[in-house]
Image (spheres, rainbow, N blue to C red):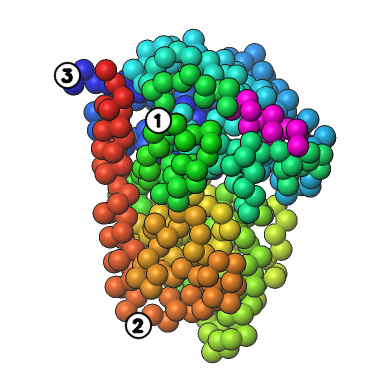
Amino acid sequence: MGQKMKVTLINTSDAGGGAAAACMRLLKALATDNVDVHLLVNQKHTDEYRVESAAGNTLSRLKSDANFYYERLPFILFHEKDKTVRFAFSTANAGTDISDNHLIADADLLHLHWTNSGFLSIKNLKQITGLKKPVVWTLHDMWAFTGGCHYSGTCDHFLKECGNCPMLKDASTNDISRKGWLRKKQLYNNVDNLVFVTCSKWLAGIARKSPLLKAFRIEAIPNPIDTDIFAPQNKVEARKRWGIDDTSKVILFGAANIMHTRKGVAYLVEALALLKTGQPEMTNIEVVIFGKNKGFDVSQIPFKVNQLGVINSQSQLAEIYNLADVYVLPSLEDNLPNMVMEALACGTPVVAFDTGGIPEMVEHEHNGYLATYKSSQDMAKGIHYVLTYAQPHLMSTNARSKVLDNFSNEIVAEKYKALYQSMLP
């Protein structure tokens, strides 16, 4: 193709949360691979010049704020079972028509990502597919094929039109999950040239079972990562900068929101307690925690805890992974978590539960440890295994190699470019 292809990525935000981070990385990866690419978001938070806000003026911003509450409040007041599901279910009843935005009009191909929290309603998504442009939709969770939940847990109602949703206090055959599922069925009716991409093979397997998506092409392409930013550094210097004792064994844990039930912090607390009682000789352990913490009491952890709060800088994040001996992810449901990839890219082994897309990154006893699902005991065993591994540099090299061979910007950008080209005339 002589001319650069014009691609517009679409995501609720350009900062905050895994989908935004993945989207920004893809934007930069494609831009360096000769694609004319932009990102259209609801409200812009970064100074990246390729990102544009759909809510460009004060009135639009007020409307987008109102959409967020219009989307959330009825759910909170009339439907949510309890606070734990508050952001685990999205109705997509409110949003903004972006179909006449110049970035949409000028694009050869549109690439949807995560568009909830009042950015695009199901009606707005229908307006986009109605433009008859090729559309790629990267799924960062299960929402595109459920009645509204982002992760279904043990519930399989999405396989049969939803209804009787376990997240709703007013669950019934014809509840809002059933209505949401049927609205999505309408959305996908008579749609050509739409390809779904999942960040993990695990999610692709589930998506292929969905009655909503079974007629569509589904590809698994991972999120990219900048392996120049997330790279091994001098551990001693990284610890000095963050005030961490150089002689300690450092366990790292982080999440965008530590208290999110899906992130499994209770299992981490239990695993650390078991480590303390089971390995009393390990006295020189420190725990480092980063991310938004609203209500997690760190005094439950039986070791010295360093809380770093929310980290927005990627270079600071890379330093934090580098100061750790092990990164622990107790997530109960996850697609292809950026934080696992970031840790591995920095050469930091990962201990996590064997669930979701995590086994596509963590190879058991090779670059980390895959603990039996929901077993705090096995997680404690895994942490001990990594902290006492005889050749830590070997595990560190394996961690870095896994990312370089599978998830670098160049590899992922090429996969997406090939997909785009297969959809363009």
Of badges 3 and 2, nearer the viewer stands 3
Where in the figure is residue 387, as x and y percent of width and height? 44, 77
Query: Residue drawn at (28%, 38%), measured in percent from left and top?
Result: 415
Q: Earlier in the sequence, mark 2 or mark 1?
A: 1
Q: Nearer the viewer, mark 1 or mark 3?
A: 1
User: Count of labels shown?
Assistant: 3
Q: Quadrant of the N terminus?
A: top left
Crowd class of label 1 (few under 14; some 14 to 19; many from 20; radius 10 Å): some
In the rendered structure, which amino acid carries the disc numbered 3?
Gly
- Disc 2 residue crowd, few under 14, some 14–19, many 20+, Cα 10 Å: few
Q: Which mark is residue 390?
A: 2
Q: Taking 121 as reference, is 286 above or below it?
A: below
Q: Which residue is at 38% across, 23% downward?
A: 193
> Which residue carries the number 3 mark?
2
Q: Earlier in the sequence, mark 1 or mark 3?
A: 3
Quick check: marks 3 and 2 in contact, CB under 8 Å? no
Q: Which stretch did the figure color magenta?
A: 173-184
Residue that badge 1 annotates: 195
The secondary structure that most of the magenta stretch takes on is helix
**Foreground pick, 206 / 126:** 206
Q: Which residue type carries mark 1?
A: Val
